[in-house]
Image: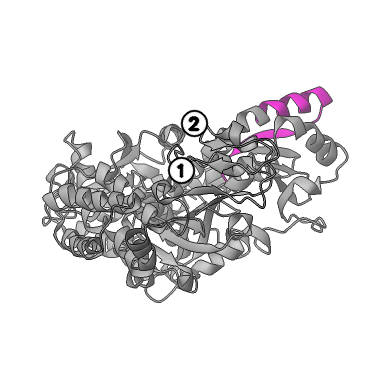
Amino acid sequence: MSNLQQMRSGIEESYKGKLNRARVVVGLGTCGIAAGGNKVMESIKSEVASKGLDVDIDFTSCIGMCFAEPVVEISLPGQSSVIYGGVFPENVSQLIDGHLVAKKPVTEMAQIQIPGDATPYEGIPVMDKSGYYAKQVRSVTSRLGRTNPESIEDYIATGGYAAIEKAIAMERLDIINEVKKSGLRGRGGGGFPTGTKWQFVHDAAGSKKYIVCNADEGDPGAFMDRSVLEGDPHAVLEGMMVAGYAIGADEGIIYCRAEYPLAIKRLNLAIEKAEEMGLMGENILGSGFNFKIRIKAGAGAFVCGEETALLNSIEGKRGMPRVRPPFPAHKGLWQKPTCLNNVETFANIPFIIRNGGDWYAAMGTEKSKGSKVFCLTGKINHTGLCEVPMGITMGEILNDIAGGILGGKKFKAVQSGGPSGGCLPTDKLDLPIDYDSLISAGAMMGSGGLVFMDEETCMVDVSKFFLNFTQLESCGKCTPCREGTKRLLEILERICVGAGVPEDIDTLERLAKVIKSSALCALGQTAPNPVMTTLRYFRDEYEAHIVDKKCPAGLCAELLTFCVVKDKCVGCGLCIKACPVGAIKGEKKQAHVIDGKACIKCGACVPSCKFNAIIKA
């Protein structure tokens, strides 16, 4: 029996003992903390102490239900664990008195229950069978919200570091072949086969090789990698070690954006604990394999998500892409062979090695195996994090997981793949989510951000938003990206203020194709995607802005006219008080009038009217 197996035996017994006690666990990922989780934790500690209860108090990461934060889990021995949402200091006492003292769950605040040995509670959805998680799978996210991310014991007790123990007893090529068999493709956006990339680095000449983890998550609305790093940092470390052993590297670097302080803190703590226990560093588990990992904090440049720009940044150079070839697999970090994958890719590796490539390949589609973590944001009821099998449809994610469009409004589009992706319309809701299907539709998987939009969204404005982002984030090295995105943005800005001309549509299409085919790196090559997909699926909105000088969504202020419907106006004067420039005139109990020349089109008058007498035309 190895040292780890002996250690694991005692840790697992201790972990089982912990689960068999009364516990209160607070979700303290970034979303939980931002919603007030730390104050909830202090209130729980105070309430438990004042009542003299024998209860363990712990914390975990985000379980994915960001829409319900702050989240608290309460469990009693032999009973289902109940996860409560919207818990604030003022209702902590109600939860403690109800669930821990009276032994009755507070059903009106309960989100889901995780069944124990006893009969499930009535009236509370069961995880994995109903509600938010019914169509999800939990592989990469299996520990998120379920274990303490700062406890290496929790990680080991749930199978952690069994993969590296198994890997160092295997032949290096056997590990790579197992990853190939799994069908895992890079989860950072490009979708390149992971095992093939490892094979390239393994075969590359040179005794010094590197493993680099890309944690420079920069897409607007994306927080998949941050959640995994905060919730299961050891899985990423273990995945990197397996990759290091497989390709013959002894050093790994995690390039993490500095805006993720909690992720960096937990990564550093995980590295420290793993080294203390002999699971990382010199002579790992007595195998003779050496591997160390360090963190490099990035300054937040979006272009550093591109692998060669990232490598330049680690080397202390300006984050600008390199001309390829040579590729990083042959000449990467400091011109040495380098294996570079993103956070989610590495986090999948321990599960694949432990359970086998065939297990992973059984999920998903023929060309897109396994599961994928997505961030759900925008005009939806359930914003948060989900993990789904490849091949699920966009409609299933929207309706069954995201809870549909907010306020009962109509779905209009979904942006997939961030600024590098595209906007897909209603008739694409039946599209299976996999690498090839999304690309054929004009979008891409990206790192996994999904931004849902309702009927009140202007697609020209959306295109302008993403072009503004990529134009600002362009490193400026190549002319197509530096100048081309600027010209695209200028045209979109003109269209949104009513100064567009019919020729602009042809110019947008032609310029987008040139940039896509000639830019140096993936940032520039994919920057036109929002323009190309909105022109493909929402051309009528461009034409309305240009020809009719109208914004169909009623969003572009310069194309709007606010007016009062006389039959509805009762002359209450509330709109006069709301108008910041005095553009509304009228006597009491008489219909008011808006001075179009004085109106700055701020829209403040619309919500102030209780009679819906002010409309946008």
Disc number at residue 581? Answer: 2
Mark closer to the chain start, 1 or 2: 2
The residue drawn where x is 77% and y is 28% is 48
Mark carried by residue 302: none
Say whether marks 1 and 2 touch (CB < 8 Å): no
Can you name the residue that lies furthest to the right here? 102
Mark 1 lies on residue? 596
Find residue 457 and report its horizontal and vertical position in percent: 47, 55
| Residue 405 seen anywhere in this rendered image of the structure | yes
Residue mark closest to the camera, 1 vs 2: 1
Give, as a three-letter code, the residue at label 2: Val
Residue 393 drawn above or below residue 251 = below
Q: Which of the pair 419/129 is nearer the observer?
A: 419
Give the residue type that dot 1 points to. Answer: Gly
User: CA–CA distance between discs 1 and 2?
Assistant: 12 Å
Residue 31 picture location, percent across and down: 54, 39
Left or right? Give the position of 111 relative to 502: right
Taking the image as drawn, is residue 151 in sight? no
Q: Is 103 placed left or right of 251 in the picture?
A: right
The percent position of residue 298, horizontal first and vertical second, equals: 30, 36
* Horizontal and vertical percent position of residue 475: 19, 42
Which type of secondary structure does the marked residue at label 2 adopt?
loop
431, above or below 337, in the image: below
Q: Is mark 1 on a helix, strand or loop?
A: loop
- Residue 119, located in which quarter of the rendered image? bottom right
Towards the viewer: 240 or 566: 566
Is disc 1 surrounded by few (<14), some (14 to 19) or many (20+) residues within 10 Å?
Answer: few
Could you tell me which residue is drawn at 70 percent across and 44 percent down?
A: 570
From which residue to which does the magenta span run? 41-62
Q: Does the magenta stretch include residue 589?
A: no
